[in-house]
Amino acid sequence: MKENILSNLKTYAFKEVTFDKLMQNRINKVLIVCSNYDFYMLEEDGRIEERIFNEYTSLNLRHPPNFIHANSAKRAIKMMETHQIDIVITWLDIGNYNAFETSKKIKEAYPNVPIAALSHHSSQLRSKLQKENTDSIDFVFHWNGNADIFLAIIKLTEDRMNAEVDINTIGVKAILLVEDSLKFYSRYIPLIYKVILKQTQGLMSEGLNEHRKMLLMRGRPKILLATTFEEGIELFDTYKENLLGVISDVNYFKDGVRNKEAGFLLLDYVRKYKRYFPFLMQSSNENNERRTLELKGKFLYKHSETLGVDIKNYIIKYFAFGDFEFWDPTQMKVLATAKDLGEFQRAIKKVTEDCLMYHAKRSEFSKWLKSRALFPLADLLSVIEYDEFENNGQIRDFLLNSIKSYLVYRSRGVIVKFNKDKYDEFVGYARIGEGALGGKARGLAFIDSFLKRNNLYNKYKNVSITIPRTVVISTEVFDQFIETHKLIKFAAKCTDDDKILNEFISKDLPEWALEDIRAFLKTTTCPIAVRSSSMLEDSNYQPFAGVFATYM
């Protein structure tokens, strides 16, 4: 398989990622079941809707959920009859013994609606949860007054609802958190989501137009939460091929009883699967650090004053977030960093062969690419056995050729928004300006999308079917040109075609459009055909074919 891929990279069939099929299940309406006083505090003091809305917009998330309130189980069920509720969040007040009964009644009436519970008292709640039948509650969290927990509950629920398809079918990455302390996982999860969503904003730079940028947001890594050893093993086995790493406590339940070795048993299980798999152990007992390091894991002390920052830094460094650092094991230093695919490609050209082999053997190239939702290229790199290359120089050539092939594939069938700072020879079809395209331009774009949709580029041996590399100047440029130079009245009154022509060609295009055209010319070494594209030439009853000339 390797030989076929290496010899046919130009015709390698990348698998198209259906980003529009990701995150099909979403939380749109949240029912909060609590006392009138608690909800008042959320609304007025906590300003829950305002803070969630601000959180969504700051992270470029669309469609923040709406919140409605019920102060009893009976009222909640009645409201669910008239509203499409996606999740119920209820308060588990220690003094209110009806809280579990409330959840049970809601679950019996609507078994498919997830229920999350919040409580001020995490230590007391743990003992109460062990006594009560909590099968009706899907998630329990500690409430410390920070509205970030609501974002975490919503995203965690969405991740669980979409995990099977998004992770195992499409290849989205995930982080496994194994922790049974309400207080700590209620702190960790909002923090991890903040890191993930900030990371995802960086993905948008890889989008070729605004629509593609928003679709890439759906490819963000997910969080999977387990509170027992058995749940952790099950989630690891189910999703291990697409896990970025594991964060685990040491002391939690195994076989129905608390086990002080549970985290180490999980770490040992993971090490048998993969030697370099990232595993972060965090514990209230500092003495667990030595054992963790012996098992090639990383360790954090739970009661450290810098715990939040330490977890964030670990995720960024070891879970393939942030910039890619090209580490040379011989020189023992970072040779280059890359924040996007363009810098990644340039760094590969100059770093040492030892550096390339170091990262290739650890599958760190494919992991970094997958964490940035560049799945087709990551999948290609992940199936290669780098030990089989004759020399390390071949690895560099393979990586560079793979990236080039992917860049060509990625731009096919897409109308790319022209960016003078990022435009290169791999972009097949780009648009300058936000206006409409003309008939010929639309026709070329349609043909390009048709070829990609039906995989016709390399259908026939030794024949490549494609459109010419194209840049379209949209009607926005024309409209601004006409308006700036006040040409509309002149053109309407003048009847001499030569005078109209001379007046038009004596004026300059907008400077921003000229800068884009110069950027295009810098990447072009072959002859260029300049052709007008009329808005009316593809009309059935108003053909303009043959009216305009082509300039070389």
Image (spheres, rainbow, N blue to C red):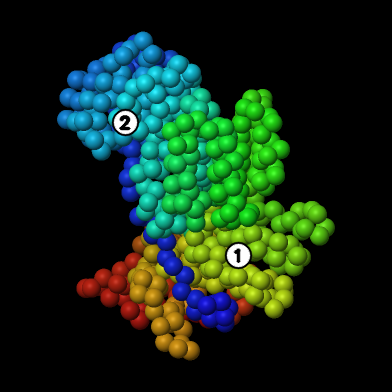
Estimate the x, y position of residue 288 in percent, counting from the top left: 66, 34
SS class, disc 2: loop
Hey, what amino acid is under mark 1? Answer: Ala
| Image height of 402 relative to 7, above or below | above
> Which of 201 and 100 lies nearest the eye of the viewer?
100
Residue 390 in which image quadrant: bottom right
> What residue would you read off at disc 1?
519
- Label 2 amino acid? Asp
Disc 1 residue crowd, few under 14, some 14–19, many 20+, Cα 10 Å: some
Quadrant in the picture for residue 447:
bottom left
Point out the residue furthest to the bottom here: 462
Residue displayed at 64% across by 50% down: 323
The image shows residue 378, relative to residue 296, as above or below, that is below
Percent across and percent down for residue 374 are: 51, 59
* Label located before the other in sequence (2 or 1): 2
- Direction from residue 194 to residue 386 in the image, left or right: right
Q: Is residue 448 visible?
A: yes
Q: Which residue is mark 2?
A: 135
Which residue lies at the image location 66% right of the left edge and 71% below the top edge?
Answer: 387
Task: Judge the density around disc 2: few (<14), some (14-19), many (≥20) Cα neighbours within 10 Å.
Answer: few
Q: Is there a contact, CB below 8 Å, between mark 2 and mark 1?
A: no
The residue at 30%/21% (across/down) is 100
Whole-number angstrom distance, CA of label 2 to CA of label 1: 61 Å
Q: Is there any visible trace of residue 40 in the rendered image?
A: no
The picture places residue 63, in percent across and down from the top left corner, at 36, 39
- Label 1: state its secondary structure: helix
Whole-percent x and y of residue 175?
51, 45
* Residue sitting at x 34%, y 42%: 26
Q: Which of the two discs, 2 and 1, sits closer to the camera?
A: 2
